[in-house]
Amino acid sequence: MTVTTERPTRRLTPTTRKWLLVLHVVASVGWLGLNVGNLTLEITGLTTDDPTTQHTALGALYLIGGPLLIPVSLLAYLSGIALGFYSKWGVVRYRWVLVKFSLTTVAVVLVPLSLLPGLRELSTLMAGTPTDQLADLGGIGSDMLAAGLVSTGMYLTNAILSVLKPWGRTRAVS
């Protein structure tokens, strides 16, 4: 009698799995795109000497991020968990999936707790500054730039891990 430690993998039909994968890729790329767009607006707003450009760039951050970041991040997160749950990769079976899961969990938590309040604060600051003057951004500008750079690095790391699938299995599940 052969005893296996391998758990049976729950399976989706090939068509359902492909649609779930499409949903995950589109949501994840959308999240990365939102982030790169916001990062571009932040850099533009922080480096310009033109008040109109600063107001336009930094004022647009919350207009874009406010309504989209939470739903897109949750869609990417939940579709990724579903893919792990219904595939051979699992959620904790392989190191690369576990790292992606961890990075995405951190990002999903930070979006409503840190990023959106920062975008709101920046939007309020821009609204309170006359349009013919550059806003005094203080630390909020550099904080938002740092957040944009870190999150872009996290999302790019996730994309690279998805393609390369390095490191093998975890010890928790052999």
Image (cartoon, helix red, strand yellow):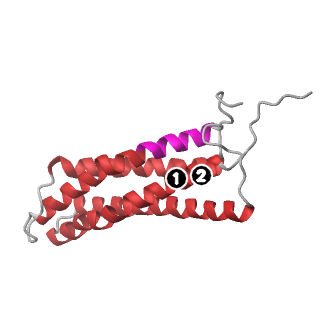
Residue nearest the viewer, comparing 90 with 145: 90
Q: Amino acid at mark 1?
A: Leu
Residue nearest the viewer, comparing 59 with 98: 98
Magenta stretch: helix, strand or loop mostly: helix
Q: Position of residue 131 (x, y in %)?
A: 10, 71
Q: Position of residue 137 (x, y in %)?
A: 15, 54
Q: Residue at x 35, y 52 (%)?
A: 148
Q: Is residue 120 left or right of residue 34?
A: left
| Residue 98 magenta | yes
Which class describes the residues within 10 Å of circle 2: few (<14), some (14-19), or many (20+)? some
Q: Amino acid at mark 2?
A: Ala
Q: Quadrant of the N terminus?
A: top right
Residue 78 is tagged as: 1
Q: Residue at x 46, y 44 (%)?
A: 105
Q: Residue at x 7, y 68 (%)?
A: 130
Residue 4 placement: quadrant: top right
73, above or below 94, in the image: below
| Residue 126 magenta | no
Residue nearest the viewer, comparing 18 with 12: 12
What is the CA distance from the residue labelled 2 to the residue labelled 1? 6 Å
**SS type, badge 1:** helix
Q: Position of residue 34 (x, y in %)?
A: 40, 62
Q: Is residue 111 left or right of residue 163?
A: left
Q: Is residue 35 visible?
A: no
**SS type, badge 2:** helix
C-beta proximity under 8 Å, tags 2 and 1: yes
105, above or below 159, in the image: above
Q: Which residues are magenta?
A: 95-106
Residue 92 is tagged as: none
96, above or below 49, in the image: above
Which class describes the residues within 10 Å of circle 1: few (<14), some (14-19), or many (20+)? few
Would you name the residue on which mark 2 appears? 82
